[in-house]
Amino acid sequence: MTLADERLRQLDNLSPSVDERVLPRCRSAAELIQKGQFESAGEALGELWQGVGRRPATEGMPPALEAEVLLQCGVLTGWLGSGRHVAGAQERAQDMLSEALRLFESEGMTAGASEAQYEMGMCYWRLGQYGEARVVLQEALKPLTEADFELKAKILIRHSIIEIWENKYHEALSVLKEAEPALASASDAVKGRWHGQMALVLDKLATAERNAERFDHAIIEYTAAIFHYELARHERHCGSNHNNLAFLLYKLGRYRDAHEQLDRAQLIFTRHKEPGILAQVDETRARVLVAEGRYREADRIMASVIKALGQGGESALLADALTVRGLVWARLGMHESSLDILRQAMRVAQEAGAYTQAGLAALTLIEEHAAAGRLSGSELAQVYGRADELLKDTQDADDIARLRACGRVTVQRLSGAQLRDKGFSFYGAVHELEARLIEQALEIEGGSVSRAARRLGLKHQSLSHMLKARHKGLMDKRTPPTRRRRSIIKKDC
């Protein structure tokens, strides 16, 4: 008996006057959702399912049954809203799930309440609100007993997702080990989730430890996840694991194999008409193309990826995509556009609470632009400081190595050019010194170009021209220029 069956069995003793069609529909929908057959689950709910984000009509239902209907509609809204990138879908899913949670708690149905919190955690995760997701999942675990082994395993597996996204791999591994004993009696869908998450953790730890055996183990776990999802007939999660496996193969330099896995994932999500998840597959393909030096192809793909992700409100994924495109534009020589989009990636991620993604965007900004002098000294120091703070808890070896490399670049830039520096240019050094002096003068004078010019011993027009022609990156340091009023008194000829 599945957890959904056990929970729904509690509703069988409801008054016979309740519409007898509702309970079987909820049961069918729960089973189909478990298999990832979301469209079929909506059909099973019949008129109760009004579409993504729409609250079902539950007037006259007992609280327990109303909670069940809200739960199923909230879960469907979260999954379909994510896959189709429906704006505001996650917030509307949270509203329905919160209402279901209150009703379950009022009826003393602890398993139902925990499942509602479990699904709310997924909504928070999709929005990049990892702290909130972690808290609600921890609350979901508290009332569960040994009899709720499958739900407990599901919650722990989802908890591991948050730790992975925040680069806390040992914490994620510990969480998955805690869930492992429940696998013996769990469904294939739950087994697939566990193996897929274990593969991700091993993948990350293999990178940190430079351990080839862990990479091999991760490939085996991805294969096991796909196997169990196929048994559960959960095609969407099969596709996601093909995508994750492709990312691992890309890191190993096996680009042809990565493209093959991406082709399989693309076929699945195209068949299911999932533009949101297709965008994630396309982003992985763009990363492979960048590694192959095929920047134009990667840029074309990223244009559609950002458009798709921008419609769904999933800020962490959007920030990652913006960062990839910023890197591509830098490699194509589109430096100003690259600077703008990388700054946007940092802002989008940090506002959503996706601090790891914000930190990685900051590292890319430094890597692609600092050495070439396209960042002013103060911005470089500020960006590195933010990256250091945002990634202070990361356990990702690549991220730590990048952070240290960016630290060396920052120190070197702020200490000034040296004759021994590789690629030293006299005029480049003069340009850098000029920028630093202008920046200091603008900061001292509160952005006033006139006062900064006097401090530097220049005319206002000369400094203004230097900013427009040679130091465009300092334009935001100045106060907006005001038009000078013309005298209304005409001078005699």
Image: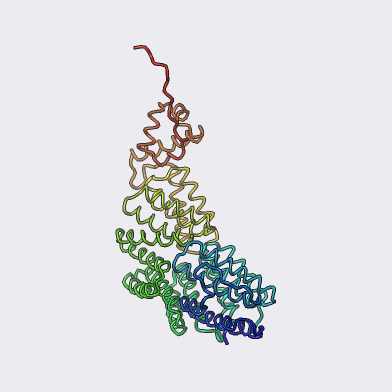
Residue 212 in the image, given as x and y percentages of width and height: 42, 73
* Above or below 59: residue 484: above
The image quarter containing residue 472 is: top left
Quadrant holding the C terminus: top left
From the viewer's side, name the closer residue of 462 and 217.
462
From the viewer's side, name the closer residue of 128 and 106.
106
Q: Is residue 434 left or right of residue 396?
A: left
Residue 1 in the image, given as x and y percentages of width and height: 58, 87
* Above or below 427: residue 278: below
Q: Is residue 115 left or right of residue 300?
A: right
What colour scheme does the image use? rainbow
Q: Which residue is pictured at 50% across the width and 68% down the height?
A: 52
Residue 305 in the image, given as x and y percentages of width and height: 39, 62
Q: Which residue is pictured at 29% across the width and 58% down the height?
A: 296
* Above or below 201: residue 297: above
Camera sees residue 22: yes
From the viewer's side, name the closer residue of 381 and 141.
141
Residue 190 in the image, given as x and y percentages of width and height: 52, 80
Camera sees residue 159: no
Q: Residue furthest top?
A: 492
